[in-house]
Image (tube, coloured by chain):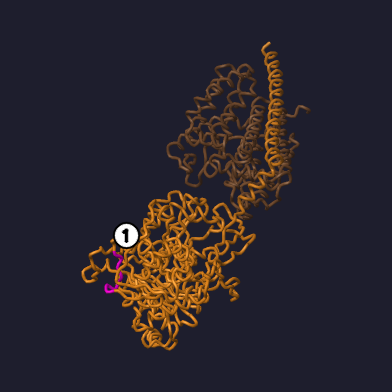
Chain colours: A orange, B brown
Amino acid sequence: MSSYFVLKNVVQETNVFNLRIILAWIAMLLGLILIVLRLINLQVIEHERYTTLSESNHLKIRPLPPTRGLIYDRNGVLLAENRVSYSLSIIPEQVDNIDELIGRLKELILIEDTDINHFKRLLQQRRGFDSIPLRLRLTEDEVARLSVESHRLPHVEITSNLSRYYPLGPTAVHAIGYVGRINEQELAVIDQHNYMGSHYIGKVGVEKFYEKELHGKVGFQQVETNVQGRLLRVLERTPPIPGKNLYLNIDVTLQRFVENLIKDERASIVAIEPDSGGVLALASMPYYDPNLFVNGIDAQKYRELRDSPDRPLFNRAIRGQYPPGSTVKAFVGLAGLEYGVRAEHSSTWCRGWYSLKGQSHRYRDWKKSGHGAMNLHHAIEQSCDVYFYALANDLGIDRLHAFMSRFGFGKKTGIDVSGELPGLMPSRDWKRRARNKLWYSGETLIAGIGQGFTLSTPLQLAVATATLSKRGQFRQPRVVFAVDETHLDELSTVTPTKQVNVTLKDEHYWDIAIAGMEAVVHSRRGTAQKVGLRSPYHFAGKTGTAQVVGIKQDEHYNAKKLPKKFHDHAWFIAFAPIDNPKIAVSVIVENGGGGSKTAAPLAKKVMDFYLLPNSPLRIANKE
Amino acid sequence: MATDWTEKSSPHFLHLDKPLLLGLIILCCMGLFVLYSAGGQDLDLVGRQLLRMLLGFGIMLILAQIRPQYLIHWIPWIYITGIFFLIAVLLVGEIVNGSQRWLNLGLFRFQPSEMMKLTVPLMVTWYLADKPLPPNYWRLTLALMITLIPVILIAKQPDLGTALLIAASGAFVIFFSGISWRLIFTAAFLLTALAPVLWFMLHDYQRERIYTLLNPEKAPLSTGYHIIQSKIAIGSGGFYGKGWLKGTQSNLEFLPERTTDFVFAVYSEEFGLLGILILLSIYLFILTRGLYIAMQAQDTFSRLLAGSLTLSFFVYIFVNIGMVAGLLPVVGLPLPLISYGGTSLITLMASFGLLMSIYTHRRLLSN
């Protein structure tokens, strides 16, 4: 019995076992089929999607930043170049603890908080596998220290790149401007695609205005990388198109001479070639070294510059808006002739003051005793205020505004330096809009002598002077003479876009105005006759004085009693030679006092330097 | 009857089963080719793996010579030693990647858990085959204990993947021992019910892996990275594959663990679905042969062991491919006979040695 049961058990056991083996086999088969189905899904149905993913995985597009264009002066003197500098970058994706890494780097090299802040900003904007610069412009010593420690600093890269450098330092900084690191506002405006890999952007001046030309076009290379982002090989390369070189109208020798003339002043001098509108010199003093700004200026230095009472960062030439004072008189005179309000020889009696009908207020002439009978010529020559009070009154503010605007007063000149301000040529309309007030006729009078609301920049006056010198031929001022398109020295000259000439009813009117300005420097009674004495060439000029503080009816301006900062600004505009103008100059010296005493001699020196190749000034400057 | 168990009666050269041997050799050769590509065409790496394979074949050969009936006497001692090692690992083991799995024996390091992959099914089989089947509840409980003690010790290392595989290998023996379907379903139901409890016993990284499986794109650079990259490798391989040595994912180092746990992704990328069908066919051939050996086995011990070992082999394949293809969570488990590494290879070859021994030491009743 027992053996039967055992036997039966064995048979039954075998049957159960074999059945379960077969079940196991079926289960395995189903398992393998499940795997195959999954793989069909991945490899056949979604194959294309994964192929794309696979390609984007190991093929990366890397930007090749273009080399920024160089800037030369009109004689080929290098003003802005790119120098190799070493910078330290981190690939954030591969770093576990960035703060800790920065901490370690801080022990080796100087890392300012501004560097860290800038880095953190970029960290949020850029993709993790891009390397992000932490410190730019490492010194050789720092590069050496980092290299020694490089084994302890994985994912830290020392890369060489080109950094902007201005070899002449502050020279012409207010024209050239500078580049700096791209900030958030700029990032929002620029074509980010084109700036991948670029560190710098023009911040002010020509660097900003010609940003597009100077920057060039980004290139790309398609590279194969491994997972660490290490480059294995370059598959395809679209080279960057380097930025174009710029040649300026500015002549560095003249520029330096000009800057040197006013180096101890708060002043500005703009010199323009009337034929072309080319800016020969554009100086605003004091100035500053643009190299400080390239890689981010440190807070302390920046505060010093910003808070200095002399305001070196302030570009007086294009942003300084001063009352033009008597410098406008020749233009106002032209308006009188043009509108037929005055004839060439009609004269006004100057008794030292002028009053509107029915008003007791006396508008004073600078000459208390009065100039007597004045025609336009003499009124310009002697800068008679009363003549122009009366003229302005007869013209009315609207006609005055319309005429002066044709010379560019109250409008931007359109110079190719960023940041220009328009000045102000007041009108009834403007006052209603800006101040919501009515226009008073007294305000017309003082507008007639360039005071009151009227404001001009030194650049504006230089341009107006150049236009006058060319008898109405307007040339938009241009700092850049040519853009080097191809790097093969084929220059394409910059042609100004806006060229509306000033035409008058009678060409002779020009002669009257210019003769008046000639008399200012060459006649015995001219307000600046001293500077015209023994001049080897004939030139025309006009003095001006911009009041800083209002003088009350019963007061007198007395420079000796006023602190320097309340002294009048001294203006002088001039062009030379008269028959074939080569240079037009405007000079302002803040708190310089009278135009004839302070500003006129400076303008004369600038013209001498430019026009007389063998002048003692030029020779002295060379030495 | 005992006289029938003679060496002379075996028609098998050196007790080798030729179909099984053929399948294993083909697999190993394929493995070497894939490793050459996955390892960045490193011949040294291939050479080292070849040496391990030869060692594995040697162990297989030795085990094939040992009569299963002779082996039986050693099993309890091996098992007890294994448990001892597992306890030792928890006390003095080396920590690698956050898990305490290795035991340094001075001359070499080894993973006692690996050894238990064979020892547990052997021990359960030894215990159950002693008495008529199916086992009663008492014996069943003891068989479960035999399985669960090492499983718990390994899970504590923590090495949940291996623990589950070992639990499965023990369970397979019990399954083949013929316990009633009612019991099987009850057990399955209980496990399902217990799943939420187990979930809270998991380590954070283990839960993370399961989350990752469900949505790898959520964490493309951390935990999901392995799965995303391996799916890209497999998917971009397509039907015909990119060709040997031409897998960009693997050659460019995007694929992690590409010579070891994720070698299947390299294979799929380079040889495509076609290559996979071939590979799976070879696996299926070996599995079928294993089950055939189990059915041909003449005593309870042999058939339970053969069935359990074959089914475990299948589970290794399924879990590895399932993980690489994104069907299962990431558990550190190599692809049998293909992945670089010696431990699993030697365990597997040992189990094939046992299978061969079972097949070639049959009593030949035809006499």
Q: Say above or below: A27 vs A241.
A: above
Is A301 placed above or below A574 here?
above
In this figure, which residue is indicated by the disc labeled 1? A358
| Residue occupying image coordinates x 49% and y 39% | B101
Q: Is residue B132 left or right of residue B138?
A: right
**Relative depth, front residue between A266 and A172:** A266
Q: Nearer the viewer, residue B288 or A325?
A: A325
The image position of residue B32, as x and y in percent, is 66, 49
Tag 1, which chain?
A: A
Regarding residue A538, the answer to whether it shows in the image is yes
On the image, the x and y values in percent for residue A44 come to 71, 41
**Per the image, is B235 magenta?**
no
In this view, which residue lies farthest toward the right? Answer: B366
Magenta stretch, residue numbers: A362-369
User: Main SS type for the magenta part?
Assistant: loop
How many marks are shown on the rendered structure?
A: 1
Q: Can residue A292 be seen in this view?
A: no
Element carrying mark 1? loop
Q: In this view, does A95 lie to the left or right of A617?
A: right
Q: Is residue A366 magenta?
A: yes
Quarter in which the C terminus of chain B is drawn: top right
The quadrant of the rendering that contains the N terminus of chain B is top right
Q: How crowded is mark 1: few (under 14 residues within 10 Å), some or many (20 or more)?
A: few
Work out whether A333 lies above or below A606.
above
Residue lying at 59% horizontally and 29% vertically, measured from the top left: B168
Report the residue that reaches farthest toward the front: A358
Question: For residue A325, which quarter of the picture?
Answer: bottom left
Residue found at the far left of this picture = A561
**Residue B245 drawn at (x, y percent):** 67, 53
The one of A375 and A588 positioned closer to us in this rendering: A375
What amino acid does circle 1 point to? Gly
Residue B81 at x, y percent in the picture: 50, 34
